Amino acid sequence: MRPTTLVFPIDEDNRILLGRKKRGFGADKYNGFGGKLNAGESFRACAVRELFEESGLSSREEDLECVALFDFQFPFDESLTHVSYVYFLRTFTGIVEETDEMEPHWFKPEDVPYAHMWDGDRRWLPLLLENKKLKGPIVFGRDNSTVDKMDLTAVESVMESEHLARIDLYINE
């Protein structure tokens, strides 16, 4: 299980910042900002670093609101399987910049380009934008793009842990 993060900045006008991935896995899809943890790095530190690297925005770990914990399972290509904490961020500084990896765009909630996002994101992001907090597995099919199964549970708050075994138990309880 590879640990990752995903951050969705939300501005004072309630617009959400999404990035169109320019290369690699998920190219041309809109998504939040994030990636893999470096050795010894916490989930929150990873989220702050990845957001800056992919958008130019600076933030603080304590300003991240943990809204979901997902186990993205790819049974037909295990190398893609990862667990991810998802954060909303309402306090940040800097100017949004396009990077080699991402082309950022602000969207009103009603204008989010769900048709150009991952299949699973289309299903869970609207729930998060309705202030729900979620946890659970999302299982992708043979094409590694379409969701075969999603078993998400709404929770009062998302348990945060740096221990992958504990995270696995929590997601699947």
Image (tube, rainbow, N blue to C red):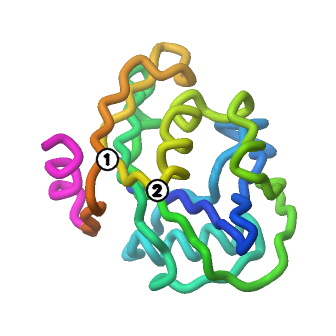
Where is residue 65 shown, x and y percent of the image? 45, 71
Where is residue 92 shown, x and y percent of the image? 67, 82
Element under label 2? Answer: loop
Residue 78 lies, with reference to residue 85, above or below; the image says above
- Specify the label residue 135 is tagged with: 1
Q: Nearer the viewer, mark 1 or mark 2?
A: 2
Look at the image and give the residue range highlighted in magenta.
163-173
How would you rate the neighbour count of disc 1 (Cα within 10 Å): few for under 14, some for 14-19, many for 20 or more?
many
Element under label 1? Answer: strand
Where is residue 160 shown, x and y percent of the image? 28, 67
Q: Are marks 1 and 2 in contact (CB under 8 Å)?
A: no
Q: Label 2 is placed on what type of residue?
A: Asn
For the C terminus, give its image quadrant.
top left
Left or right, 137 with respect to 105, comes to left
Q: Magenta-highlighted stretch: main secondary structure?
A: helix
Name the residue at 69% across, 49% down: 109
CA gap between label 1 and label 2 equals 13 Å
Name the residue at 18% across, 51% down: 170
Residue 154 lies, with reference to residue 57, above or below; the image says above
Quadrant for residue 117, please give it.
Answer: top right
168 magenta-colored: yes
Q: Label 1 is placed on what type of residue?
A: Lys
How would you rate the neighbour count of disc 2 (Cα within 10 Å): few for under 14, some for 14-19, many for 20 or more?
few
Name the residue at 57% across, 24% down: 145
Residue 121 lies, with reference to residue 166, above or below; the image says above
- Specify the label residue 131 is tagged with: 2
Quadrant for residue 158, please give it.
Answer: bottom left
Left or right, 30 with respect to 147, comes to right
